[in-house]
Image (cartoon, coloured by chain):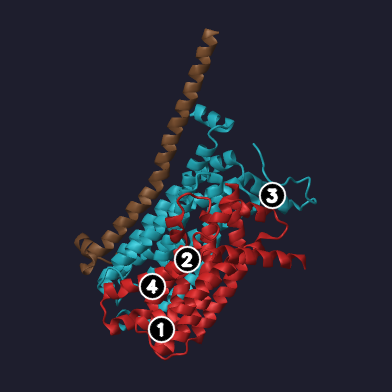
Chain colours: A red, B brown, C cyan
Amino acid sequence: MAGEGFYRAMLRRQLALSLRRPVQLFNALLFFALVIVLFPLGLGPSPETLGEFAPGILWIVALLANMLGVETLFRSDFEDGSVDQLLLAPQPLYFSVMPYLLTQWLLAGVLLALVSPLFGLMLGLPVGAMGALAASLLLGSGVMSVLGAIGAALTVGLRRGGMLIALLVTPFYMPVLIFGSGAVQAAVTGVDSSPYLALLAAMLCLAVALGPLAIAAALRISVDS
Amino acid sequence: MYFDSVAAVLAMDGHGPYVWAAYGITLLVLAQLLLWPARRLKRLRRELRGEVRRREAVKTNSVETS
Amino acid sequence: MYFPGPSFERSETPSIIAAAMWTFFHKLGSPPWLYTISGQILRWLLPAALLALVVGMCWGLLFTAPDFRQGNSYRIIYIHVPAAVVALGGYYIMAIAGAISLIWKMKMADIAMLAAAPVGAALTFIALVTGSIWGKPTWGTWWVWDARITSMLILLFLYLGVMALYEAYDNKVAASRACAVLALVGTVNIPIIYKSVDWWYSLHQPASIKFTGGSTIDPSMLYPLLLCIVAFYALFACALMANMRVTILDRERRTGWVRRLVEES
């Protein structure tokens, strides 16, 4: 299939572009770490308090980090005209946006999920809940990347999009936050967290199936305007 | 009628302030909701009327000068 | 008068009903027709809606028995529930109008979508404020993170998001298309948000403020409630049409029919 090469090349290009400045990847993790530090400072250092709030804190910070990262997803490609090229290409836009989403998820979501147990440890999260934390972040960040990309595509043509994307996307993130922190909470209390993870996986399927439709439509609108 | 007197209606067994405040705010917002487009429509029509009048004035002026 | 969209001749001779529907659809897309007809509808719908509202409110406030558990404070239900129901319904109306404008590029549909956003936001605001006031005598606090109130708050943010997005675009045609996409994404998300908030609440629900769900409502309390819901829907329609009329006139200000309309008055 001829299209396959196209998508593989797109994915390679996206990864290469992102990996060219590895500092930017670390910036996201640094942001995550910094905001985590704010919580002991604000709530007090008592391990009981922090341990109780740890699932929520970790998930909220991951959500914010994702939102900040996804904002620039299409920006540079929109400005240099690559998005226009994608619109003109014979490949459907529905599939052409997939490499963007996959890269964003791999470099922001997966990386964050992998290092999150470290921060969980610092906040006094029980070791038994680390698996649920990483797994829920792994699935949830995928959903958030797709939803965030819709907001990014809608606001990419606007000069002052930064605050706006947060306004548009945060309500959609809320179910992810509920089930994500719910999974960790369940693991902390010793309940099976797999129902939550299953729900997150279902949301990921739905987001991957329908999200690119909205992203493609939004990119068309942004290019036209 | 459930209540015996006007005073009883206003008091509602101590819940009066809450109930009446809720109804008051609701009516206020609903009134604004309906008055706002009406005001905008009136202003727009006045603006358009002014535009038409100005255009006619320009037309008659140009006829007179030619 | 112009009729956008496909014409009859091109399609395979439709049945009379389909033809009538197409005519209606085409007329809906015609600004002067919509402007005139909405003016005529408003002339009787607005008084009817206000009458229904006054009757429903008085019925609920004065002629029903108080709830045996909550006393008289439950009378807020006659504005809280209608506002919440219509606010939620309004989002779907907005999204459907958005879908029509995206698919058939119908100008009047996107005007309807934009007109619905502030009205829906105002109704959501009413639902939130009355719910908060109701909470004080019932639960003892002004704000409780109850599932329904939280969902309403999220709905308000969804409405405000659509309005903020529209304001952010300079190109208003693109703005309404972007809003339509956002409204459609919201439509898919609302059931998920509602269900997840429901579940979240049932998990964290404090025992002291437990509400017995699914309790039946007495018919004597139900009828005024239904009347109020009808009144709120009618008021939503009135405000929607009133907003649309302003936008139609504003967007069509350069056309002949608007000039004639202005000259006549």
Which is in the foreground here, disc 1 or disc 3? 1
Crowd class of label 2 (few under 14; some 14 to 19; many from 20; radius 10 Å): few
Label 1 sits on a secondary structure element that is helix
What chain does badge 4 belong to?
A
Confirm or deny contact between disc 1 and disc 3 (CB under 8 A). Answer: no
With A118 as the anchor, is C68 left or right in this view?
Answer: left
Q: Position of residue C121 (x, y in %)?
A: 42, 56
Label 3 sits on a secondary structure element that is helix
Looking at the rendering, which quadrant does residue A32 occupy? Answer: bottom left
What chain does badge 2 belong to?
A
Which numbered disc covers residue A33?
4
Which numbered disc covers residue A185?
1
Which numbered disc covers residue A23?
2
Residues at marks 2 and 4 on the same chain = yes
What chain does badge 1 belong to?
A
Q: Which residue is mark 3?
A: C22
Name the kind of residue labelled 4 in the image.
Answer: Ala
Confirm or deny contact between disc 4 and disc 3 (CB under 8 A). Answer: no
Q: How far is disc 4 from disc 3 in space, using C-alphas?
A: 60 Å
Q: Position of residue C42 (x, y in %)?
A: 48, 45
